[in-house]
Image (cartoon, rainbow, N blue to C red):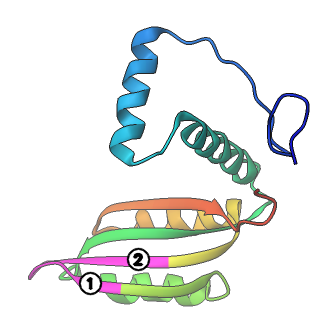
Amino acid sequence: MRDGCGCSAGLVRFGVAVNGKVLSDFDRAIQEQGYANRSEAIRDLIRAHLVEREWDGGDQEVVGTITLVYDHHGRGLGEHLTDIQHDHQALVISTLHVHLDHDNCLEVLVVRGRSAVLRRLADSLISVKGVKHGRLTITSTGRGLR
């Protein structure tokens, strides 16, 4: 079904003014990413912005990952990280542990809960002495996105 502008029902066409070089760079980037057209890329950018706003308030339920790289030789480090996870077992859905080399491990926790709570959990894990790098990545549960 089409509306007056020739758009499919539910879709809205709008114009955007942008610098030519910026548009050229954007077109090159979205082509490299495999987008079929600008509309798909712009829709994803808008969704990404809305997802960020969703979890920025701290009270929305979100899902995500906490990624840690650490030296497994650190005294009591593995046990300490595990204790923190056990203290928050309602938030941790799953974990993946990978031995990167003789000294370093990668641990990925799949988490679900209120964004502010997940941030506190991630901070408590990332700040443990011996953790070389850590990152919290949050996304939407998908509810409410179209």
The residue that disc 2 covers is 108
On the image, the x and y values in percent for residue 122 come to 52, 66
Q: What's the residue type where badge 1 is placed?
A: Val
Vertical order, 120 against 84 (above or below): above
The part of the chain drawn in magenta is 97-109
Q: What's the residue type where badge 2 is placed?
A: Val
> Which class describes the residues within 10 Å of circle 2: few (<14), some (14-19), or many (20+)?
some
Q: CA distance from mark 1 to mark 2?
A: 9 Å
Q: Quadrant of residue 77?
A: bottom left
- 114 to the left or right of 67: right
Q: Secondary structure at mark 2?
A: strand
Q: Nearer the viewer, residue 67 or 47?
A: 47
On the image, the x and y values in percent for residue 91 come to 64, 81
Q: Secondary structure at mark 1?
A: strand
Vertical order, 13 against 43 (above or below): above
Residue 68 visible here: yes
Q: Residue at x 69, y 61 (%)?
A: 115
Q: Which mark is residue 58?
A: none
Disc 1 to disc 2: CB gap under 8 Å: yes
